[in-house]
Amino acid sequence: MAQFQDLKTRVKLNPETYFKYDGGEHILLKNIHSDDGLSIKYDIMLILYELIHWKSVGELVEPWPPGDQEKIKAHLETLYASRIVITDEAEAAVASESGLSETLGKNIHINVENHHVMLRDYVRMAAYRRAIDRAVTPETVALDLGCGSGVLSFFAAKAGARKIFAIERRSDIIYLAEQLAKANGLDTQIEFVEGASSHISEERLQPKPNLLVAEILANGILEENVLEFTIDARRRFLAPGAQMIPCGLDIYFFGFDCGLHQSRWEEVEEFKDLYGIDFTMLGHVLCGKATMRLDRFNTALHKAVTDPVLVQAIDFMTLENPAFVTRFELVAKEDGPITSFCGYFKAHLDAETVLTNSPWAPPTHWTHLIYTLPATRFVKKGEALQLELIYDGAMRLQLLD
Ligand SMILES: C[S@@+](CC[C@H](N)C(=O)[O-])C[C@H]1O[C@@H](n2cnc3c(N)ncnc32)[C@H](O)[C@@H]1O
């Protein structure tokens, strides 16, 4: 555990936000409320919640409860390995980003939010670069749907695409992407189009793109409406027979024991009397949702009680209706408690390139989609649970028996 001695984390654009582990018995959190530190915030909250049932955020110097040190070290190791933790090397970037507005010569607030986290997700970046390199020819006219920082357009430009339309609905980040294109001499190939793709007319993108590149995969898998936007883009913008990256998406679920269950449902109790009012119903709604408190299945800490099952295989080339209701079965591979169900995706970027946030694959920046049961379900080996996954613009999972 030597690498955690004096581990220091900084969140870019807010040098005041950090947590510090002294290698001994204390963890220090400071200004963890930062908007820019969202993913770090939830990971750290999870650690604290599991260890000391600490529910608020702010500033803390707390000894860990005795006996739990191995657990927190394992958590920190996972965070470190998944690169959610940005170590000291980010400091240089902090310094250069804080000078961004000056460099661009414009008084504009650019909120890079998670874009730096996505750029540092090397599993994601390598998969997209490979698929783009394999797809692009000198005849390629690409559409980058949701270009963000512009990175996928830049890959396509470097691979030799004739033209790239980069669509982005956020004005601040598309402005940055344009400046980056200029700074890298890629602006002659790339045309930036500001707006939500669904509001852009098909005449605007001429000649018609023969390659779609899009990364609008959310922690909640379909949360960014990837299905709706992909269908719309394919129908209105793309030339017949155009290639799509990704061309398909598989959704998997499995059952597990999250270990947080008791404390999570104890919270519902608290809602019984808030300011003399019974808020129990609100507590049930809260606990019925995919939880943000535990947002990652950790193979070192949690136990899968069923194998993962492919619940929905979506073919982007032929999909016409984004909505679905799918029944499926999870079979217990051993006796044990199931408190939660974990969903993850496999995106087929091309026939040979798969990008996944499976907990058993190399870690990415994506968390998992986790639904928690209102009561622990004890299952026997071989017992089958019947479930239903529904998507109608929002995703829901229901246990049927
Ligand atoms: C997950 S980020 C990916 C950004 C970039 N392509 C990358 O790979 O780093 C998705 C981006 O797509 C944008 N976006 C999502 N749906 C969009 C739509 N329908 N039209 C335009 N932009 C969209 C979001 O604002 C966000 O910047």
Image: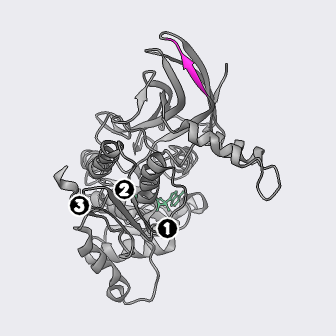
Q: Nearer the viewer, residue 108 or 44?
A: 44
Residue beneath disc 2: 141
The quarter of the displayed image where residue 67 is located: top left
Give the magenta-colored segment's residue range: 376-380
For marks 1 and 3, give the CA distance: 44 Å
Kind of residue sitting beneath label 2: Val
Any magenta on residue 152? no
Residue beneath disc 3: 158
**Mark 2: few/some/many CA within 10 Å (<14, 14-19, 20+):** many
Residue beneath disc 1: 58
Secondary structure under the numbered disc 3 in the rendered image: helix
The quarter of the displayed image where residue 120 is located: bottom left
Q: As drawn, is 17 to the left or to the right of 134? A: right
Residue lying furthest right: 277
In contact (CB < 8 Å): disc 1 and disc 3: no
* Mark found first going from the N terminus, 2 or 1: 1
Above or below: residue 43 compared with residue 227: below
Kind of residue sitting beneath label 1: Gly
Above or below: residue 240 compared with residue 331: below
